[in-house]
Image (cartoon, helix red, strand yellow):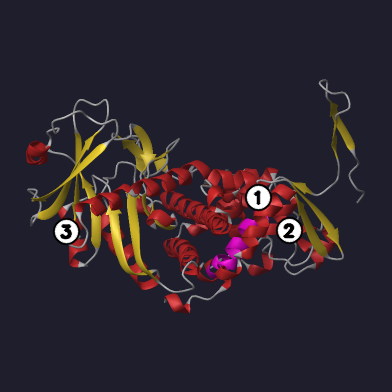
Amino acid sequence: MGEAKQETLAGMKFNRAVRVEARPEKLSDSGGAVLVREALERTGLLRSLSDAIEDPRDPERLTHPQKELLATFVTMLALGWRDQDDADALRKDPLLRLSVSERSGDAPLRDDPEFAQTRNPPVPQGLASQPTLSRLLHRLAEPARLEALRGGLRECAERRLLALNNGRKTAHLTLDVDGLPIPVEGQQPGSAYNGYVHDTIFYPLVTTSAELGDMIAVRLRRGNAGAAEDACEAIREDVQWARAHLAHSVSVRIDAGMPSEGLLRMMEDDRVRYVARLKNNAVLDRLAAPYLKRPSGRRPSTVRTWIHECRYQAESWSRSRRVVLVVVDEPGELILRHFWIVTNWRADKVPGEQVLARYRRRGTAEGHLGEFKDVVGLKLSCSPRGERSEDWRGQIIGPVRPCDDPFFRANDALLQLCAIAYNAIHMLRRVLYLSLPVEEHGWSLRRVRERILRVAARVSLHARRVIVVVTQASARYWSLIWEHWNALDDPLPHGR
């Protein structure tokens, strides 16, 4: 086959010396795809997922092995390509082809059909198509494979967190548990209108490693689920896993709407320390009334905060519990603001000021959830397309419970892949945090993507070697990341 010819596309009116040309060169705007694949490789995530998830396809007729399909899905999500149709438009991108392939050398970039067919298995001439990725997603929706995906997400977080502590469990870890509303379009099984957010949503339950930002678990729930629905089982499972793999002591932080007698009792019985905000009610307002008086004297121009220790027992509670009243005096406000925090930390061990400080660090976790939605671009869109029918009354004939619906489980699988992609980008950010001077800290996930992942690169082939050329501005950050890769290669026996 002859090589593509150089083609002049246009000239520019603002500067007639500028001319746009299309040349048969291996160029890419996704240079960071190799970094994402390297992160997945260093953690061993793709290998463990491939071993845990059975591939029912005939191995003699495969073009894209399952490990490559998983790498394609996660890499595209990490780079911001959230639609499966994007794989068709990017199927010839050299760095995406190179990053997701299991073939060594320059084989992933060889476009010779005769060469591709002589390999065993055959070398694909580009990325997998949208139908292939869609079929993968529905295979992953099987309960056993879905559970393997959840295990892969935890393993990704475990590898990074233990690498921070030389392969050993840390002394203490806080888990943040919260709901994350995800707006949906169309008729997604399990989605529903939620009166609290005034939108049709899914309402997954997300567990993160608090201030460190790693995703530990995501569980898809129907859109009209209560804030505390499934929280008791989820928190117990996540705490037990974190105690076994990450930390000797684990505490939990939750927001208002989730504390219930069952949940609080479970954590107390399991000796889990918790900090949770309570919704204000008439009884709590009467309890707070004596403290809602501004002291005499001129008000300062700064915010003032007062802490008061109390005991409180709601009607649904089986016992009284320690609650901390926080009263805030903000400049320009006529009325003092107040809220309540319930905790089982002992007052002599953790005074009220420290309880408030622990709760306020929830803002960091909420920021991570915001980045998860913004950067990964959550878009769950596995809709039924003719697979289910209606009876004469217009009612759907088919699964009723969301957990039994294959399309709901496919959206759950997509959510797990999105969380894995988030952990991969977050891993790069935390490596940069270790390498950069203090004045350069504060990188957002979006900045990581724009400055490190979505960078221009040129690929050249020489003596069966593949050379990726990036700009000097990107090379500085890439070299800093490479200095800390080796920590992720270490095995995990110390943390077990």
Of the residues under marks 2 and 1, which one precedes in the sequence? 2
Question: Where on the picture, by quarter, is residue 248?
Answer: bottom left
Image point 18% across, 59% down: which residue? Answer: 344
Q: Position of residue 230 (x, y in %)?
A: 28, 54
Q: Is residue 49 visible?
A: yes
Of the residues under marks 1 and 3, which one precedes in the sequence? 1
Q: Nearer the viewer, residue 253 or 123?
A: 253
Q: Position of residue 227 (x, y in %)?
A: 27, 46
Secondary structure beneath dot 2 equals loop
Q: Main secondary structure of the magenta part?
A: helix
Q: Position of residue 252 (x, y in %)?
A: 29, 58
Of the residues under marks 2 and 3, which one precedes in the sequence? 2
Q: CA distance from mark 1 to mark 3?
A: 59 Å
Position of residue 309 relative to residue 55, above or below, is: above
Three-letter amino acid code of the residue under disc 2: Pro
Which residue bears the numbered disc 1? 129
Secondary structure beneath dot 1 equals loop
- Residue 347, numbered label: 3
Which residue bears the numbered disc 2? 124
Q: Is 209 inside the magenta-drawn segment? A: no
Secondary structure beneath dot 3 equals loop
Q: CA distance from mark 2 to mark 1?
A: 11 Å
Q: Which is more foreground, mark 1 or mark 3? A: 3
Q: Is residue 398 visible?
A: no
Three-letter amino acid code of the residue under disc 1: Ser
Among all residues in the image, which is located at the extreme front?
297
Q: Mark 1: few, some, or many residues within 10 Å (few <14, many ≥20)?
A: some
Q: Is residue 224 left or right of residue 269?
A: right
Q: Position of residue 62 (x, y in %)?
A: 67, 63
Image point 17% across, 61% down: which residue? Answer: 346
The span picked out in magenta is 31-48
Q: Quadrant of the C terminus?
A: bottom left
